[in-house]
Image: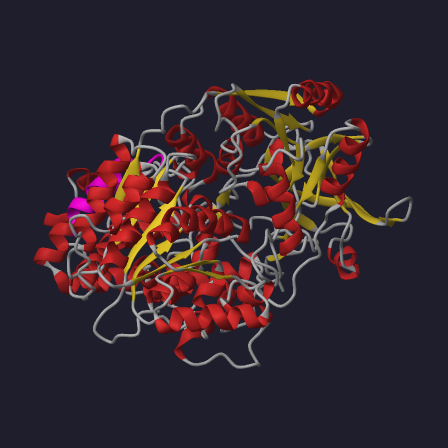
Amino acid sequence: MARSASVSKSPQASATPAAPAGVAERAGTVAQGKPSDTRSAPQKAMDKLGLRRDIDLALHLPLRYEDETRLTRLGDAREGDTVQVEGIVRDSRIEARGRRQLIVKLHDGSGEVLLRFLNFYGAQQKTWSVGVRLRVRGDLKLGFFGREMVHPTVKVVNEGTPLSHSLTPIYPTSAGLPQLYLRKAVEAGLKRAPLEELIPAAVLPPQARHWPSLREALHFLHQPSPEVSLSALEDHSHPAWQRLKFEELLAQQISQMRARAERAHLKAPELLTQPQGLQDQLLAVLPFALTAAQQRVCNEIAKDIARPQPMHRLLQGDVGSGKTVVAAIAAAVAMQAGWQCALMAPTEILAEQHFRKLVGWLEPLGVKVAWLTGSLKAKAKREQLAAVASGEAQLVVGTHAVIQDQVQFAKLGLALIDEQHRFGVAQRLQLRAKLQSAELEPHLLMMSATPIPRTLAMTYLADLEVSTIDELPPGRTPIVTKVFADSRRDNVIERIRDEVAKGSQVYWVCPLIDETEETDLAADQAAGRLSDARPPLDLSNVTQTHEELSATLAGFGVGLLHGKLPPAEKAEVMAKFAANELSVLVATTVIEVGVDVPNASLMVIEHAERFGLSQLHQLRGRVGRGAVASVCVLLYGAPLSDSGKQRLKAMVETTDGFEIARRDLEIRGPGEFMGARQSGAALLRFADLHEDGDLVEQARASALRMLREHPHAADRHVARWLGQKSEYLKA
C-alpha cells in the first residue's frame, strides 16, 4: 500500500503536523457562540489574533511566501540559496557531542546535503530513517562537514508525489497556532466568506479597471501562481494589493466621515467671546505678544467653541511653539461664558508645568485653578474635589486623576488634552463624558507637539479639525545636533565641565526600561491604562550616570530625576534646576515634555539609538529656549541598526518638527506613530500612508460619493472591514 505524503519538521520549524479533521469548519465559526473551555490551543490562538469571522480569515494575508513548486538538483544548487530538494536518506543519527542534535544525510543522485536539527522529537529519527524519500526546503549553507541545512521544512514523499501548484503562504501567527492549521482555516474561511462586490463601479477610481475584484484579489494573494513577481507581492505593488489597500482606506474614510456627521447632531454649550472679557485681560498681562500663527489658531478655536456643536480639534505645533497659551486663551473664553475647563496631561511633571504657568497667568485675574493628581494627600484631594464639584474651581489641571469616577464637575464646557497620543481612546472618552448633561457634551481641544504628516491626518484624524502653529516665538536660538560614539563619552564630559564652568546648565538623559514617569499607579489602573502587574524599573543606568557625573564634576551641583522618585522630591529637584542651584540634571524621559529652563544650553542623550525619532526631537526641544546657542549631543552604542542610523541622521539634518514627523512615519509606520497600542487596535493593516498617499486621496473622494449615493453599501463595507474598530475613530 502506497504511503501518503506527510509533513513534518522540528519544533522550531514552520511546517507542522496536519490539523485535526474538521478544523476548517470550526475555524470559520469561532464567533458564532461564546468560546468554551474545550477549545483547542490553535482555536484559542486564532481568537487572540481576532480571527473570529470568515471574513477575518479571508483578510488574514500572508507575510511572505515559500516556493514549493519546483525542485532543485543538489548538483545545481548554490550555497546561500533557499532551495527545495528531494532525495533518499543515507544516514540518520543522534549526535551527543556538545549540544544533542539529529543529523540526517540526504542524497539525490547529484550530490549530498546534511540536515541538522537542534530541536527534534525522538519519533522523527524513526520517520526519517535510511531509505526514506524526503522533500526538504531550506537555506543551503557551507558547514564544517560540507553543505548543510539547519531546521529545513521536511516532507516524507513517494517518488512522483506532485509538487504544489502555487506559492505556499506563510501567515502571521502566534504561539500554539501552527502554519498548516492556519492555512486550512484560512482556506475554509475564504470559501465561505461573503465576498460579493459592495463598492459600485462608478465609485471606484479610474485605475480600478486594472484591479481584480475583491474575491479574485484575495484568492490570488492567498495562493499566487509561481510565475508572479515575488517583489510585486512583497512590496505590495501588485494590482491585487492595490485593490485591498483601497478597500481598507475606503472603509476607514467612510467611518471617519460618519463620526464627523454624527457629531454634527450633538449639542455643546455656545462659548461666545465677550468684548473686554477674560481673554483680553489675559492677553494684556502676558509678558509677550502672540505670534501671527498663535493669533490665527486662537481665532479658529474661538469660532468652533461659539457653535452649538462640540468642537473636536487638534492643535499641533512644534516643541516650544506656544500651545499652552493658546489653550489658556480658549479656557478664558469658556470661563468668561460661565463654564468650567479641564486640562489633562500624561505626566505629573508636564501637568505641574501647565499648572504653574496657568496659575501665574490666571489667578491674578481672579480665576481659581484646581490641582488633581494621584499623589495628592487625602485631605487635599477632598478639598480639590469639593471645589470642582461646586464650580468654585473654574479650571482643573491634572493627570489621569481628572477622569476618576469621584471627580464631578459642576459645569464642564471645554476639555483640553495635552500630548493626546499618550492617552488611550477610553481615557479621552471618559473626559468628554464629565459634563453632567444628557443633552450636551464639552468641546474638545487636543494638543500635540508631534506634528502629524498630511496623509496621516487624512486617515487617522479625518474627523478632526486641525490647527497648526507653524511659527516659533522670536528669540528661540537654533540647536546644533552632534552624534558621537559612546567611546567618546569622556570627551563629552569634559565639554560639560567647560559649559557649567561658564554658568550654563546641562541635561543628561538616560534610557530606562520601563519609565512610568510620574503617572500615579492607582490613577493609571483606574483609567484602565495599566495592569496590576508591572515589571520593576531598571534604574541602574540613570543612577550610575548620576554617581559618575557627581564624582567627575565635583564642586558643581548634579541632580537626579526619574519617575520612581516621590512627587515632592521630583518637584524639589526641578525647582532647584530651574533656579540654577543645580548645574547638571541627570534624568530619564520624564523631562521629555513641558520642562522649560532657558539657561539650559547643552543636552546629552545617552544610548540615543534606543529612542524613537519623535522622542529624540521632543527631548532636544528642552534646550534652545534662551539667548545662548544650544547643542544636543547624541551618544550611541555600536553597532547601529539601519533604523537607528536613519533616526540619528535625521536628527542631525533637520530641526523641523514636520520633517521629523515625516521621517518618523517612514521609519515606524502609522500604528506606532499614532500610539495605536493605546487605542487598542491598529486601524490600518495593509495600506502604507507613506507610499499610498494617492490612494488616500482617492478613497476620500470615493467615500464622499458612496455615503451620498449608496449609504447602505457604505454601512456593509465598514462592517466588513472594521467591525467594532470603527468606535476607536470617534475619540
Q: Quadrant of residue 482?
A: top right
Residue 77 seen:
no
The reply to whether the magenta stretch includes residue 621 is: no
Left or right of 306? Residue 61 is right
Q: How is the image coloured?
A: secondary structure
The reply to whether the magenta stretch includes residue 695 is: yes
In the picture, which quadrant includes the N terminus?
A: bottom right
Q: Nearer the viewer, residue 188 or 175?
A: 175
- The residue that appears at 45% across and 71% down in the rendered structure is 385
Where residue 709 appears, x then y in whole percent?
Answer: 8, 57
Does residue 654 lie above or below 3 as drawn? Answer: above
Q: Nearer the viewer, residue 483 or 386?
A: 386
Which is the main secondary structure of the residues drawn in magenta?
A: helix
Instruction: Kindly give the residue lying farthest to the right in the view shown.
Output: 97
Left or right of 693? Residue 386 is right
Residue 621 seen:
yes
Does residue 654 lie above or below 284 as drawn? Answer: above
- The residue that appears at 47% across and 68% down in the rendered structure is 384
In the picture, which quadrant includes the C terminus?
A: bottom left
Q: Nearer the viewer, residue 89 or 695?
A: 695
Where residue 137 appears, x then y in whole percent?
Answer: 61, 42
- The residue that appears at 77% across and 61% down in the rendered structure is 123
Tell me which segment is drawn in magenta.
Answer: 690-703
Does residue 478 lie above or below 622 as drawn? Answer: above
Does residue 41 lie above or below 496 as drawn? Answer: below
Where residue 533 appears, x then y in whole percent?
Answer: 65, 65
Count of picture labels: 0
Left or right of 297? Residue 128 is right
